[in-house]
């Protein structure tokens, strides 16, 4: 069965530290998509990135980077030089083809960046 | 601007009452979803609709009902049969509900409290 696990419930760092949020997924499908969303205190989830199962190339966007490794079923998210504005809950999610477009979410990791 | 509007932002329900949460989108998206968020449990799928006049149960549909009479609207009713309705409810939409490729656009959520 499909499942997403974010083992880190809460992480606290000091500003300018690097931090990595872990995501491990389970699926039997060969075609699937992985997502990261950010939920700031306002509550609305904001899309950060999507990767498909055939593209293992790592991606960097400013201070954000993502490491996708099919061999370990992981899709980890790193924030470099963290800032207070990065404080939020971060969700990793999985979708499979022909499953109604449903996203399966991990439990979320609450990141607190202190000045 | 296109987006998803959820109302009300805060809702208080008395024991034994039914309440309806509104979700409207002007993105011309085919698929819509309702999730429930509880602390430490991530997002759990309640109901989803891939097209107008059709919807399916998610993982925790008991005590909830929905309708999809218009493409833009997907209201969620929390019935008195839902034993623990206090939670944060998020509505989302997606361009289509087949491939899982597009991920979601989220509303800002409704926080429901039983008093």
Image (cartoon, rainbow, N blue to C red):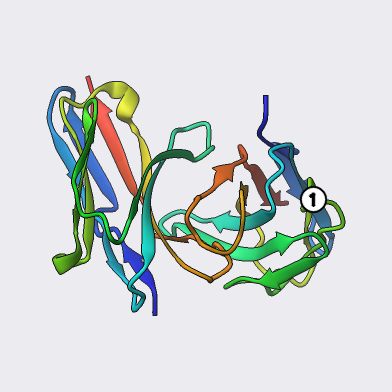
Work out whether residue A113 or residue B50 is closer to the camera in this orientation and state it.
B50
Pointer 1 indicates a residue of which chain? B
Residue B19, x across and y down, in percent: 82, 54
Numbered label tally: 1
Quarter of image, res A90: top left
Q: Residue at x 80, y 59 (%)?
A: B52
The picture quadrant where one finds residue B3 is: top right
Q: Residue at image x 28%, y 60%? A: A54
Q: Which residue is mark 1?
A: B71
Q: Quadrant of the C terminus of chain A?
A: top left
Query: Does the rendering let one see residue A90?
Result: yes
The kind of secondary structure element at disc 1 is loop
| Lateral position of residue A23 relative to residue A72, left or right | right
Seen at 46% across and 53% down, the residue is B39
Residue A107 in sight in this render: no
- B105 left or right of B25 in image: left
Q: Give the left or right position of residue A46, taking residue B1 as reference.
A: left
Q: Label 1: few (<14), some or many (≥20) within 10 Å?
A: many
Q: Nearer the viewer, residue A17 or B39?
A: A17
Q: Nearer the viewer, residue B81 or B31?
A: B31
Vertical arrangement, residue A10 with respect to residue B55, above or below: above
User: Is B100 above or below relative to A59?
Assistant: below
Residue most extreme to the top? A115
Q: Extreme front residue here?
A: A54
Residue that appears at 14% across and 23% down? A16
A4 vs A19, left or right, is right
- Identify the image quadrant of the N terminus of chain A: bottom left
Give coordinates of residue B6: x percent, y percent. Answer: 71, 40
Q: How far from the left and from the top, in percent, is residue A26?
A: 31, 72
């Amino acid at each position: 069965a499909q499942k997403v696990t974010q083992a880190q419930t809460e992480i606290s760092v000091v500003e300018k530290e690097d931090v990595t949020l872990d995501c491990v997924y389970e699926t039997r499908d060969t075609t699937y998509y992985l997502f990261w969303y950010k939920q700031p205190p306002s509550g609305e989830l904001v899309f950060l990135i999507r990767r498909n199962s055939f593209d293992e190339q790592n991606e960097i966007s400013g201070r954000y980077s993502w490491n996708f490794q099919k061999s370990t079923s992981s899709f980890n998210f790193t924030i470099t030089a963290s800032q207070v504005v990065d404080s939020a809950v971060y969700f990793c999610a999985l979708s499979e083809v022909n499953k109604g477009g449903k996203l399966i979410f991990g439990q979320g990791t609450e990141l607190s960046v202190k000045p | 601007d296109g987006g998803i509007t959820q109302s009300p932002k805060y809702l208080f329900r008395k024991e034994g009452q039914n309440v309806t949460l509104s979700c409207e989108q002007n993105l011309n998206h085919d698929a819509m979803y309702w999730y429930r968020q509880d602390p430490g449990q991530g997002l759990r799928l309640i109901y989803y609709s891939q097209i107008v006049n059709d919807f399916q149960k998610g993982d925790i549909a008991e005590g909830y009902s929905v309708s999809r009479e218009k493409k833009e609207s997907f209201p969620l009713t929390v019935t008195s049969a839902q034993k623990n309705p206090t939670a944060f409810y998020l509505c989302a939409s997606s361009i289509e509900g087949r491939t899982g490729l597009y991920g979601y656009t989220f509303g800002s959520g409704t926080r429901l409290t039983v008093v």
